[in-house]
Amino acid sequence: MSITSSENVFDLYIDGKAYRPEAATYIDVISPATGKVVARVQNASSVDLDVAVAAARRAFKAGEWRNMKPADRSKVLYRIAQQIASNAPELAALEVAASGGTIKRILGLDIPAVVDLFMTLAEEVKTYQFVEYISPRPFPEQMHSQIIKEPIGVCGLITAWNFPILLACMKLAPALACGNTVVIKPASNTPTSTIRLIELIGEVVPAGVVNVINGPGAELGDAMTLHKDIDKISFTGSTEIGKRVQRNAAETLKRVTLELGGKGAAIVMPDADIERAAYGALFGVYFNSGQACESATRLIVHESIYEPLLQRLKEISETVVVGDPMDPATAMGPMSSESHFRKVMSFIESASRDGARIVSGGDQMSVPNCEGGFFVRPTIIADVDNGMNVAQQEIFGPVLSVIKFSTTEEAMQIANDTIYGLSAGIWTSNVVEAQALARRLNSGSVWINDWHMMRTDVPFGGYKQSGYGREFSKYSFESYLETKAITTSFETNVANKALYKIVHSL
Ligand code: NAD
């Protein structure tokens, strides 16, 4: 169990050790599966944030981490991967208890994915071009330039509650690979797995390189984004808060990366295989109970296959196992909190009011052994118009909105008619046409004949109001580096310096 937890009370972790704020106040962590308190976590104030930022600044200035040879930093990244892999059961149990994500997903996907991510970036960092030499130019005179990529400094990382470990590692891995130091703030309803993760990373990096604080975003988030000694903010969360983050960061012109909301559109072409599209569409929207930014929330279906596909969606949807997230047989757990549950239910009600048709689900579910839990029955809504709330706003629940189309032009127009641009996709037997259609979708990721096809060596991020900057792969390094140009003149005779004549009489 955690070195800083006793009876499920968690301290913070700053400057290489457990940290307990002077004014010890706590935030309760509530299991969304049972409604019961599962842990209590220290609540940081802006004073504690200052302590964390100062530790990160000292570690950055000390230089042990930032000046470490990339090959040596690579070895540390591999050790972090080992730390995570060998503590997987504990990390997963903490995350299930706080977030309601299923043990099947967290142990089967999230932990292996973050281990793989640290190993992928451990390889990338060895060959990444941190220094580039530019060929000398003859004019105006002999000079030589180097382009140097340097770590930005102290990075403030802010993450959402839906995939706590995964979202944290999507930021930690590139930030650390590039030599930065970090202060991370997880969502205050799901902080425990991130705190334990930071303790584990803290064991293998110099003190102060990784620090974690906890507290409500409204106070601590603002304090971070306005902080004068944080150089960069990487934020994962809603588009609404993302805009506030960008406004706050402008005060000190912090570098910013934003991974925000989505309203994924999957187009089902008339030649699609109905069985594959039905299973895939539901995988796209029910994964993590629909609480995924890249979910396939809008299914845009050609009129020729609309009713048969709806029939299969309904049949398959009713077989999805909703239950206790700690049960390895469970496919879908609860909504992550009571307030979020209410929000999802109100979207479903709005669809009925707007004239859409509830084909399956649409109500709360009671789950044995999880009587106080916030479970939504997997829901399919047909005859949705793209102007309706359920088609335009992020529901973040197990709710599929099905929209009918007649022409490919119309399908493209509907798919792109959203403020978001995170994920989009096409179900078809014609993969050649799909390539052309993929170019026309305004989205950071396009998936053909499947969904959630994220790879640690392929960039992921948003177009439009889904944010900017990329995570995963070597492309994530660009968000954690500054670019410096160093140019040296080799002309020793001032009379030969062509541009001096503009100022001097030579
Ligand atoms: P949220 O915006 O409410 O909160 C996200 C984080 O921001 C939390 O840590 C929260 O405490 C913090 N926060 C709150 N107010 C803040 C402020 N004023 N300043 C700074 N930080 C503040 O989002 P959420 O409800 O926790 O998460 C769900 C959202 O996250 C969805 O919109 C989802 O699409 C998005 N998301 C995006 C991605 C992606 O990669 N694009 C991944 C996961 C989740």
Image (cartoon, helix red, strand yellow):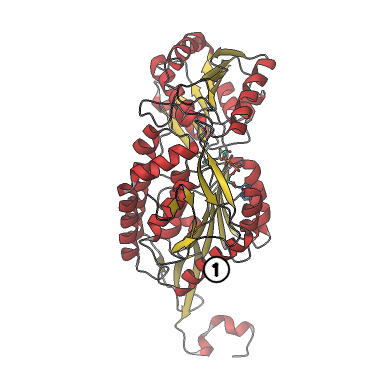
In the depicted view, which residue is nearer to us: 117 or 266? 117
- Single out the residue that lies furthest toward the front: 7
Which image quarter: residue 69? bottom left
**Can residue 455 be seen at all in this image of the molecule?**
no
Q: Check disc 1 and give the amino acid type.
A: Ala
Task: Tell me the residue that label 1 is attached to.
Answer: 54
Residue at (51% x, 43% y) in the render: 190
Q: Please rate how many residues cluster around mark 1, counting C-alpha atoms within 10 Å: few if below 14, some from 14 to 19, many from 20.
A: some
In the depicted view, which residue is nearer to us: 17 or 299? 17
In this figure, what is the number of numbered marks? 1
Vertical position of residue 141 compared to residue 189: above or below: below
Horizontal side of 420 relative to 486 (left or right) equals: right
Q: How far from the left and from the top, in percent, is residue 121? A: 36, 53
> Image quadrant of ligand 1?
top right
**Can residue 11 be seen at all in this image of the molecule?**
yes
Horizontal side of 491 relative to 346 (left or right) equals: left
Q: Quadrant of the C terminus?
A: bottom right
SS type, badge 1: helix
Vertical position of residue 370 compared to residue 501: above or below: above
